[in-house]
Each structure stands twice: as structure tokens, then as C-alpha cells.
């Protein structure tokens, strides 16, 4: 039994007779649960519906549409289905449907995209219904066999019981009959108070192969006759490939072909990747770097700084008249912050393997968005949907990077130059570091105003800098404005500001340098929470108030924001003295639908070495599906966020990113890992995300503690630029 | 050509002597449990054992490894089952994405061989592998669990 998604299962893929399936049901309109004709997995086992296959030995195969990249939602989604299915959890295994099958079956599995901490919250309703509908059909099938009323039968742990007659059967025995039934029209979900599996910290389903080396990531794929490719894209984004001298590497061992890609990149294809990379390093390449080669971090910073002071700006949140209130304020506080580019630096560099013939194109890769990867294959191959396929593999890290499909498109184009030969494209770490989709760069000027009684009467935040949506999803701009820029600062929605200020203005001067931005774990809450939460500390300090009490007074209209803040304050011991030499900082945030807060205890040596003793982090995500995984996501978000705060920051020189590997873009090690105490206070009634929100409070909680320890306010990331590091 | 002894088996590989051991293991011997992360011995994803000591295989050449006993994640356990570190990893549900964990496990197995009951400070000093998911709390727990197994 494979209790994980392994490529064996994935590639064995499963649909026979899909074409025979009459009219797949559109998601959201009807329950997407199959039809009268039995759809079968490749091993012949029947699909009870699209989400559930049951084998005669009672193995339950749960289909997972979203991608697993370490965040654990594969296991969480299986729990959601299994809760309603009432199956034996020990017999659950999982399987990815393919993007091609999703298209062929009219998106029966819905959205494959796995980002924005949406994996569970955006699919929880229909996957639970999938489990519930399957359970109803299995019970119906048993009742039909026994010729008893279905209402007299119950199911638990994959066993169906007719209590009156004492008869029992198992899911595996009735799955075939159940699969022939018409799906129920009305599916009721359990009341959350009756959940037995949701809310339990069961172990992940994908661990076994990850401790033996057997798990196959995209970089590990082997196909018969496969060749390997290494690639160099123009170091300056926007530049072009001018020429290369192929003759210079013609005799090098293993080299098969040199391929120009997109007019901006060149790839060497060889028998092994090491040969490909060695030859690529020896290949003379001339780039036309273009105008962007003049851009530097200094020129970007100057341009952004201008945006803080003047020019048009989009308004993201406004009430009262902040400018007038500031003009008449008894006391004003002003500060300017900035946040740099960050690389995702997934442990597994970008890669994809493609096999192209004029009749068919298949790709094997890790992707956070199988359907976007599929669309990229169609576009790059020029073939229609029924001639393309993407085989998703477990990701060696995503963090938002693998939602993009640049590496997929490249792989297909290289394979297209060698029809019939599978080619695996693997980026070197250097290529990965210098061709990221970087956390966007911004600056922020904040001005706060108090009345004569030290009440905060006005707050003006002016953000200047890059929009992700402008580059990646221009369709999502609203009259040119990027609403995501105001994540954590918005008046309504899933990422709202937690403070009520009588006169408020939050605006964005959009300035888009040529460096490609991307969705980087936490996205815009990373900088917005630093800007707002560090500045709240500055304001509290300016009027001699306690940072917690100062915040609390402004949060009475936001009880959920306040509850998570209070929770961390209580647990860290705010209000009672910290140990000698230890100082505390706080931050709170609403993002991805979840309310989160963080508190840090640190000590500082010589002003330059920070020892983080303790982190307390709280979250109210509405519901917690797997507390063990939520705890890991919270701790992991602090590792990612604090790595960025201390060691991160990508700089630009001559139009290119300067950091090329982990020696210049470092990441936290175990010695630097603080104790992270997670508090989960799910209040119910909504579904928030988990993977990202808490990253937002990591940096400001530590920066506020640093101020408490030293009296010095840090307004610029990363700390290494100020010679501050981990103790 | 090179002869490499990997997990007790002799491989006769068509590989240049200056090739990093990592790539000989992955591409020539076909053992993909050992991962490429950085190529400059920074991240530790490619950690294997050379005569029992943990090394970052991207920084060792084939010629340097020839004649030595190379152990990869695939050869860490025995026929009777998982190595105690792997078992502890399984029981503590350590991996997230898992990509760094082969190297992490190999580094820890070597540590425990030299230091069967490492303190937290010993762990801090010896385990310097990068994990971007941030599994360090579980890694530490599992090291202590393996040490006490």
C-alpha cells in the first residue's frame, strides 16, 4: 500500500473510458460526482466519484487536486474527504489527477492552483461533499443488496452496518455497485462539532518515501533515452541572446545539441546534466543586455523614494481626512521603511522534463499550478489540449515560485528541438538565484498624528514600489490599481487593517522596475506588516505608551485581530518582567483570511548579535484541519521570514541580481532556530489560510523587540546590511 | 572510467575523475535520493558518507571518492529495515517538502555514530544543513529520539 503520492501511482494514471463519461458536471453548479457510467482507475477499481476510488481490498484512494510542496495540505485534504466518507484512515492513500484529465472531464476536480494559502480553504466545501456523496452511495449500495431501507444502515471506518439484522459489509465489497448509482442530489455535511478526523494531528501521508530517498521529485525523473539540459537565460531581464559560439564546445563529452530558447536563453543538451552544465559554462555567449543593464539597487531606491513624496497614487484605504488631520496634529511622527527583493530559493531548483513529438507533448514537473503548467505546455508545444499532458510530482519546495511556468515553457521548447527524445531541464542554483520571481521591492513613508491628549488621530501610509499583479496578473488590476498591494491594510476582505484611526489614508505609488516580481510566501504582508507594526511601536513610544496597550485601544472594533494579539501577549508574559537582558516585541496581522499575531523574546549582544530565545505565534484560521501540520507551518513561516530578515535581500547591479547561491543568499540553520510556541484558537464560521499569514508577524515582532532592547529602530531589511546577525 | 563502491556495491562508471561525486551518484549510478541543492557545499542536500564520515558530495570528486566506502540514503538502512535516524524521522513526522531530508538524515546519522547522545549545542555545531521549509524543531526532536532509541 502506498500511503503517499508516489510517481508510480501518478503515472499509472487512472482513467479508462473518460470519453464515455457523458457530460462531466460543472463545478459549483452541480455536484461533480461522476455519473451512471462507471469510471475506472487503471487497475480497474471503480471511482465512486471523482474524489474517491475504492479497491476491492478496501484501500481508499483519495484524489488530491492541489499540489503538495511540503505544506501538508495533501494530508489535510485527504482528512476532509475521509471525515465525510467515514472510511478507515489507515487504508487511505492519495493520488494526483492530471491537469489533462481535469480538462477532459470539464474540471471535475476544480482548481489545481496551490498558492495564497488557498489549498484547503478554497476546496474544503466540495471535497467534503465528495466524501459525503461517496459515503451515501456506498451505504445505498449495501442497502440495495440487503433490500433494506437505506435509513436503517450506517457507516463507520469503511464498514456498513444494518443494525436490525446484524449484517455488515465493507466499502470494498460494495464500491462496484455504488459506482453505478446516480449521485445524490442533496449532500449534507457534518456539523463541525461532530468531526472526528478533521482537527486531529494525524501523521502526513507522504513521509515514508521522503526518509528513504525513494521520493521522486522533478529533478529525479528518469525516462528511457532521456537527455539532460542546462540553461542560461540573459542575466539582465529584458535582454536578449545575441550569439553563441557552438563550435567551441562541439567536441565536449556528451554534448548532443545547443538550443536557443525564446530568443533570450541558450541551453546545452547532453547525456548527463553535469556534461550539459560543464559545456554550457564553456560556451561563449554574447548577450544584448539592453537598457535595463543600467539599473542598480541605488537607481531603483531613488526612483521609489521619489514615489514617496509626489506623483499619482492609488488609494487602498481611506477614511476621514488624514492630510488635514496631520496638518493640525499636536504631535507628528514620521518614518520611512523599505523592503528588498527576496528569492524563493526552493531547495530543489526549477526543473521540468518534456517529451515532444509532433503528435503529443508530455511534461513531468513539480508545479503549484498544474493547469497553468498545462496551459504553458499547450502554448509552447503548439498542440491542442487532448494531445498534451502534465504529470505533477511532489515539489522540493514552492513558496510561490512554482506557481510560475517559465521553466516548463523552456523545457518544452528544448524538447521540441529534439522530437521523440525526453529532455530534463534542470536549472543550476545560480540560474535559479538570478532568474527568480522575486518578492517585490517597496518603500513606505508613514506619518502619524496625535491630538493634545496623545490620541492617535491620523495615519498616512504611502507605499512606493512594485506591483506583482501588474507583472503577473494584469487582468486582476482594478483601473490600474493593484489591490493586493494593500494586503493586511485593506478596509474589508481577507487581509484587513486591525486598527481604527479616525483619519486614515493608505496609498500606493506604483513603480515597476524591470526585475520580475512574484508571489513569495506571505506576498505583500511581509513588508506591510513591518511597515505598520513597527510604526505602531514608534507611535506608542512617541507618546510613552505600552506597545500592547497602545494597540489594544485602537482595536476595539476588531475583536478577532485583538484576540490573537491578546493570546500571544498573555503567553509571552507581557506585563510581567522578562528574564534579565531579554526584551519583547509584538506584531499582529490579518491575512489570507486568518488572524495572526507574534511575540518575540530576544537578547542583543553589542547591538549587532541577536539571540532569539522564544517566539509565540497565534492564529485564528477559523478551523484547524491538522494541528500538527499547522504548528509546523507556523514554525516554518518563521524560519522563512527570519531568514529573509537576517540574511535575505537581493540586490541589483548592472541590471542583474547579484546574489548567485547560498553563500551570498544565506538561510537560517538549526543553531539559529528559536523555540516557536504555536497557539491555535480557531473560532469557527470561516476558513482562513495557514501556510503564509504568520510569516508577516515574524520580522516586526523581532524588530520591535530589537528596539526594546537597544532603543534603536531598524527600518531597513535585511539586517546583514547593518552588520546585525544571529548570536 | 571509475570504480566506486556505493552502498556496498561496486559500480564501474563511465565518468571523468574530476566529476563531482554527487553527479556520479545521481546520474551514473542512478541513485537519486542524494539531492542537488547548491553545488558549492553550502546547503548539505547532497550529504553522503565517505568511509562513515559525512561529506557534501558536490564538493568531492570521483577520484577522491574512489576506493572508499560511499553510503547514500538508499544504503543507510539495512535489510531488516530503516536506520534508527530514518525511523525517528518517520515517527516524528519530520519532513515537509522533504528535498533536504536525505542530506539531513545522512548528516545526523554520521553525528550519532561519533556522538551517540549529542547535546543541543552539539547538534547546533554539527548540523548545518539548510532546510527552507523550516523543519528544525522536528529535526532536533528526532535527533534526540534517535539517540535514545
Image: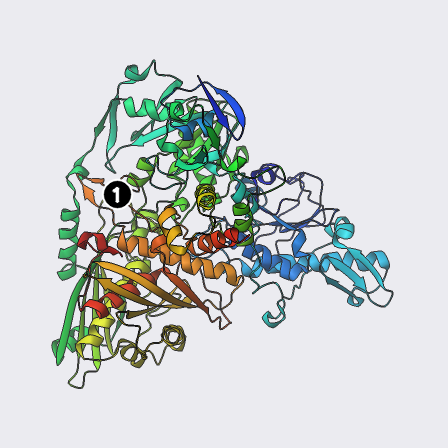
The chain identifier of the residue carrying mark 1 reads: A
Kind of element beneath mark 1: loop
Instruction: State left or right for residue A216 relative to residue A698.
Output: right
- Answer yes or no: is residue A123 visible: yes
- Frontmost residue, A100 versus A384: A100
Instruction: State left or right for residue A302 relative to residue A483.
Output: left
Residue at numbered disc 1: A664
Please tell me whether residue A48 is drawn above or below residue A14 in the rendered image.
Answer: below
- Frontmost residue, A243 versus A652: A652
- Frontmost residue, A563 versus A423: A563
The residue positioned 52% from the left and 44% from the top of the image is A210
Location of the N terminus of chain B by quadrant is top left
- Answer yes or no: is residue A378 visible: no
Q: Residues within 10 Å of mark 1 (few under 14, many from 20)?
A: some
The residue positioned 63% from the left and 57% from the top of the image is A130
Please tell me whether residue A207 is drawn above or below residue A581 in the rendered image.
Answer: above
Q: Residue B128: x, y in percent?
A: 36, 46
- What is the number of callouts on the image? 1
Q: Residue A647: x, y in percent?
A: 27, 51
Q: Residue A440: x, y in percent?
A: 27, 51
Q: Residue A105: x, y in percent?
A: 59, 45
Please tell me whether residue A97 is drawn above or below residue A638 in the rendered image.
Answer: above
Q: How is the image coloured?
A: rainbow
- Frontmost residue, A402 versus A251: A251
Amino acid at each position: 500500500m502506498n500511503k503517499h503520492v508516489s510517481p508510480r501511482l501518478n503515472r499509472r494514471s487512472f482513467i479508462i473510458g473518460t470519453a464515455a463519461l457523458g457530460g462531466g458536471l460543472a463545478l459549483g453548479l452541480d455536484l461533480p460526482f461522476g455519473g451512471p457510467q462507471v469510471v475506472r482507475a487503471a487497475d480497474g477499481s471503480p471511482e465512486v466519484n471523482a474524489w474517491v476510488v475504492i479497491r476491492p481490498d478496501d484501500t481508499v484512494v483519495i484524489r488530491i487536486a492541489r499540489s503538495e510542496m511540503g505544506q501538508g495540505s495533501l494530508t489535510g485534504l485527504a482528512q476532509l474527504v475521509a471525515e465525510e466518507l467515514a472510511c478507515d484512515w489507515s487504508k487511505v492513500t492519495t493520488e494526483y489527477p492530471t491537469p489533462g484529465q481535469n480538462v477532459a472531464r470539464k474540471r471535475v476536480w476544480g482548481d489545481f492552483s496551490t498558492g495564497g494559502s488557498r489549498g484547503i480553504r478554497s476546496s474544503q466545501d466540495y471535497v467534503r461533499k465528495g466524501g459525503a456523496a461517496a459515503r451515501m452511495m456506498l451505504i445505498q449500495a449495501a442497502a440495495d443488496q440487503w433490500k433494506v431501507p437505506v435509513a436503517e444502515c450506517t457507516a463507520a471506518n469503511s464498514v456498513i452496518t444494518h443494525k436490525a439484522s446484524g449484517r455488515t459489509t465493507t466499502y470494498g465489497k460494495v464500491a462496484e455497485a455504488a459506482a453505478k448509482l446516480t449521485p445524490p442530489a442533496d449532500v449534507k455535511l457534518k456539523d463541525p462539532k461532530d468531526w472526528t478526523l478533521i482537527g486531529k494531528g494525524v501523521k502526513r501521508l507522504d513521509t515514508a518515501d521522503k526518509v528513504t530517498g525513494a521520493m521522486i521529485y522533478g529533478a529525479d525523473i528518469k525516462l528511457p533515452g532521456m537527455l539532460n539540459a542546462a540553461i542560461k537565460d540573459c542575466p539582465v531581464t529584458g535582454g536578449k541572446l545575441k550569439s553563441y559560439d557552438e563550435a567551441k564546445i562541439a567536441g565536449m563529452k556528451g554534448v548532443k545539441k545547443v538550443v536557443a530558447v525564446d530568443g533570450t536563453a541558450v541551453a546545452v543538451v547532453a547525456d548527463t546534466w553535469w556534461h550539459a552544465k560543464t559545456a554550457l559554462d564553456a560556451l561563449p555567449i554574447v548577450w544584448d543586455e539592453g537598457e535595463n543593464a543600467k539599473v542598480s539597487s541605488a537607481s531603483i531606491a531613488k526612483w521609489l523614494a521619489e514615489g514617496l513624496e509626489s506623483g499619482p497614487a492609488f488609494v487602498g484605504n481611506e477614511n476621514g481626512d488624514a492630510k488635514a488631520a496631520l496638518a493640525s496634529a499636536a504631535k507628528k511622527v514620521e518614518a520611512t521603511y523599505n523592503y528588498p527583493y527576496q528569492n524563493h530559493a526552493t531547495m530543489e531548483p526549477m526543473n521540468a522534463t518534456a517529451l515532444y513529438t509532433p503528435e503529443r507533448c508530455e511534461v513531468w514537473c513539480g508545479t503549484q499550478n498544474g493547469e497553468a503548467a498545462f496551459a504553458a505546455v499547450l502554448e509552447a508545444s503548439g498542440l491542442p489540449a487532448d494531445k498534451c499532458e502534465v504529470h505533477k510530482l511532489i515539489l522540493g519546495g514552492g513558496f510561490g515560485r512554482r506557481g510560475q511556468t517559465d521553466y516548463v515553457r523552456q523545457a518544452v521548447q528544448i524538447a521540441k528541438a529534439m522530437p521523440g527524445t525526453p529532455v530534463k531541464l534542470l536549472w543550476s542554483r545560480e540560474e535559479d538565484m538570478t532568474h527568480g520571481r522575486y518578492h517585490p521591492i517597496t518603500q513606505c513613508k508613514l506619518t502619524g498624528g496625535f491630538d493634545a491628549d496623545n490620541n492617535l488621530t491620523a495615519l498616512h501610509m504611502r507605499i512606493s514600489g512594485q506591483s506583482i499583479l501588474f507583472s503577473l496578473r494584469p487582468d486582476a488590476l482594478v483601473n490600474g490599481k493593484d489591490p493586493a498591494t494593500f494586503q493586511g491594510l485593506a478596509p474589508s476582505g481577507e487581509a484587513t487593517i486591525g486598527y481604527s484611526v479616525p483619519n486614515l489614508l493608505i496609498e500606493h505609488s506604483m513603480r515597476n522596475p524591470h526585475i520580475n516580481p512574484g508571489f513569495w510566501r506571505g506576498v505583500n504582508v511581509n513588508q506591510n506588516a513591518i511597515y505598520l507594526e513597527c510604526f505602531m511601536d514608534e507611535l506608542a513610544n512617541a507618546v510613552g505608551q505600552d506597545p500592547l496597550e497602545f494597540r489594544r485601544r485602537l482595536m476595539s472594533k476588531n475583536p478577532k485581530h485583538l484576540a490573537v494579539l491578546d493570546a500571544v501577549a498573555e503567553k509571552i508574559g507581557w506585563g510581567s518582567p522578562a528574564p534579565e537582558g531579554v526584551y519583547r516585541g509584538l506584531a499582529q496581522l490579518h491575512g489570507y483570511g486568518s488572524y495572526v499575531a507574534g511575540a518575540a523574546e530576544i537578547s542583543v549582544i553589542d547591538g549587532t548579535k541577536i539571540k532569539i530565545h522564544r517566539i509565540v505565534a497565534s492564529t485564528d484560521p477559523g478551523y484547524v484541519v491538522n494541528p500538527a501540520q499547522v504548528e509546523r507551518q507556523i514554525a516554518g513561516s518563521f524560519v522563512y521570514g527570519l531568514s529573509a530578515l537576517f540574511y535575505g535581500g537581493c540586490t541589483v547591479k548592472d541590471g542583474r541580481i547579484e546574489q548567485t547561491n547560498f553563500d551570498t543568499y544565506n538561510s537560517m540553520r538549526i543553531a539559529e532556530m528559536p523555540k516557536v510556541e504555536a497557539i491555535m484558537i480557531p473560532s469557527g464560521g470561516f476558513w482562513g489560510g495557514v501556510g503564509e499569514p504568520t510569516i508577516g508577524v515574524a520580522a516586526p515582532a523581532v524588530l520591535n523587540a530589537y528596539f526594546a532592547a537597544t532603543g534603536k529602530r531598524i527600518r531597513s531589511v535585511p539586517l546583514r546590511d547593518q552588520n546585525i546577525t544571529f548570536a | 572510467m571509475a570504480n566506486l563502491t556505493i552502498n556496498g556495491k561496486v559500480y564501474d562508471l563511465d565518468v571523468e575523475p574530476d566529476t563531482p561525486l554527487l553527479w556520479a551518484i545521481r546520474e551514473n549510478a542512478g541513485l537519486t535520493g542524494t539531492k542537488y541543492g547548491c553545488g558549492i557545499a553550502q546547503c548539505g542536500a547532497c550529504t553522503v558518507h565517505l568511509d562513515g564520515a559525512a561529506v557534501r558530495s558536490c564538493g568531492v570528486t570521483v577520484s577522491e571518492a574512489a576506493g572508499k566506502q560511499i553510503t547514500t540514503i538508499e544504503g543507510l538502512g539495512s535489510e531488516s529495515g530503516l536506520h534508527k535516524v530514518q525511523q525517528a524521522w518517520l515517527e516524528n513526522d519530520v519532513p515537509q517538502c522533504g528535498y533536504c531530508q536525505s542530506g539531513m538524515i545522512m548528516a545526523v546519522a554520521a553525528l550519532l555514530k561519533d556522538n551517540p547522545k549529542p547535546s543541543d549545542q552539539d547538534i547546533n555545531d554539527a548540523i548545518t544543513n539548510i532546510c527552507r521549509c523550516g523543519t528544525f524543531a522536528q529535526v532536533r526532536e528526532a535527533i534526540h529520539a534517535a539517540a535514545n532509541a
